[in-house]
Image (cartoon, rainbow, N blue to C red):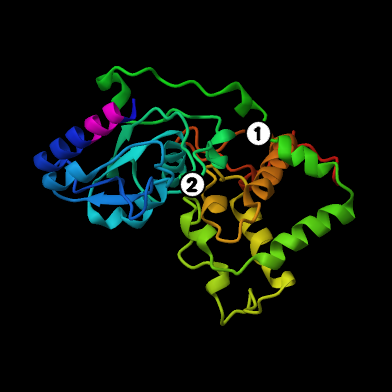
Amino acid sequence: MTQAIEAALRKRAQELLASGEVAQVIAWGSGRLTKQTAPLFVTTPEQADTIVFNDYCVNALAKYAFTERDAGKLAVCVRGCEARGINRLIADKQIEREQVYLLGIPCQGMKDRLSDEPLAKCVACTHRNPVIYDELLASEVTVPVVPVPQSAAERFAEVKEIEAYTREERLALYNDAFDRCIRCYACREGCPVCTCRECFVDQSDVGWQGKQGNTDENRYYNLVRVFHIGDRCIECGECERVCPMGLPLMTLNRKWIKDLDELFAAGEAGLTEELDNALGHYDVHDVEEFM
């Protein structure tokens, strides 16, 4: 399946670039290490043959539709996670729908290149197939559209487990995590919904965020970020995947998502291009048991 999609990707990238329909194709290329891939930015038809698609294409590409938006019209490879990210970027008015040509890819879930086990962020994925696209490559290579595994339905299992902890146990768990945070901001850079012109942590003159490397400052950064993206998080898991310290960032995100869903019926973000921020509007039917 992956070889057929790779061939289709190369063919369509070459055609789109040769015709001038797009200025750049955002896909994956080979990395320096075994079973490693990296984002690839293809600008000529000749470069299309360097595109790869296999079980180790772990990087989500939606963020690059934002960072490369001034390069001209972009063709972006989209699985479920990228498609939801594109929808959020459109809803947040960070890109226009006409700026991107979306090459849809059904996804079976990626693997960790070291262990060959299913990638953690893919296990709980609820939308393997793209929710928006201009063409679905699966139809051209006659491969089946991949269903979401039943085990993905319970995406809040880990959250519920931690909710059962005592307050002291939860505090100890996350103090340990925040102690390890080095504030490299890789989570922010990989996140497709972190698109502020200037992040609050970079506003040193205002003093929102201190520069000390301690638990309190690290907690402040991580929790403010979670609250900021909570009703826009598409659950792509890039923040946790790129974290060099192994922080349980998606557990934090999903706790907030779960609360928003229970309080405001927020649902899942990024399924459409429509703006529907649970924290951005008031409804008289909102649950108010916390007041």
The verdict on residue 7 being magenta is yes
Percent position of residue 258, x then y: 70, 39
| Residue 32 found in image quarter | bottom left
Q: Which residue is mark 1?
A: 155
Percent position of residue 122, x then y: 53, 36
Left or right of 18? Residue 203 is right
Residue 114: which disc? 2
111 or 15: nearer the viewer? 111
Left or right of 6? Residue 171 is right
Q: Vertically, is 276 above or below 242?
A: above
Q: Is tag 2's residue or tag 1's residue first in the polypeptide sequence?
A: 2
Residue 202: which disc? none
The residue at 18%/51% (across/down) is 43
For the magenta stretch, what is the residue range? 3-9
255 or 128: nearer the viewer? 128
**Dominant secondary structure of the residues highlighted in magenta in the image:** helix
The residue at 61%/45% (across/down) is 231
187 or 55: nearer the viewer? 55
Q: How many marks?
A: 2
* The N terminus lies in quadrant: top left
The amino acid pointed to by label 1 is: Arg
Left or right of 22? Residue 200 is right
